[in-house]
């Protein structure tokens, strides 16, 4: 279960999770969106406070899984086309 799913199912706000984990709301928001992996102490707090409903593997699947294409290749950014001068 992702942290966002846990938050929704338990009717918690980003602020509630921040108090539970000892984090500021912006950090919790990044974790919920899958933009960051939690540090070991933060992951310990998340697992403890969610009673194991959210685990390291849930973050790994979200954060790392979305960054890679099938076959394990990272997506490439398309180069912006240069603007033509008149």
Image: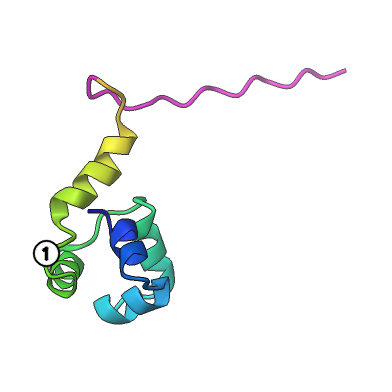
State the image coordinates of residue 66 (x, y, percent, origin top left).
32, 37
Q: Is residue 9 left or right of residue 58?
A: right
Q: Give whichever of 52, 66 is nearer the camera.
A: 52
State the image coordinates of residue 45 (x, y, percent, origin top left).
17, 73
Instruction: Examine the structure image and report whether residue 15 is included in the region drawn in magenta.
Output: no
The residue under the point 25% across, 40% down is: 64
The residue under the point 28% across, 23% down is: 73
Chief secondary structure of the magenta portion: loop
The residue under the point 24% across, 60% down is: 38
Scheme of image coloration: rainbow
Where 59 sits versus 43, above or below? above
State the image coordinates of residue 16 (x, y, percent, origin top left).
36, 78
Q: Is residue 84 left or right of residue 73?
A: right
In the current view of this chain or complex, which residue is farthest to the right? 86
- The magenta region covers 71-86
Label 1: few (<14), some or many (≥20) within 10 Å? few
Q: Give whichever of 7, 70 is nearer the camera.
A: 7
Where 64 sits versus 35, above or below? above
| Location of residue 11 by image quarter | bottom left
Count numbered badges in the picture: 1
State the image coordinates of residue 27 (x, y, percent, origin top left).
37, 66
* Residue position for label 1: 52
Q: Is residue 85 left or right of residue 63?
A: right
Q: Give whichever of 5, 56 is nearer the camera.
A: 5
Label 1: state its secondary structure. Answer: loop
Name the quadrant of the C terminus. top right
């Amino acid at each position: 279960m992702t942290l966002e799913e846990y938050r929704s199912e338990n009717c918690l706000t980003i602020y509630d999770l921040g108090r539970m984990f000892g984090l500021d709301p912006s950090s919790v928001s990044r974790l919920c969106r899958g933009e960051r992996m939690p540090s070991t102490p933060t992951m310990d707090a998340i697992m403890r406070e969610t009673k194991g409903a959210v685990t390291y593997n849930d973050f790994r699947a979200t954060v790392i899984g979305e960054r890679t294409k099938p076959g394990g290749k990272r997506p490439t950014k398309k180069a912006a086309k240069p603007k033509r001068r008149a």
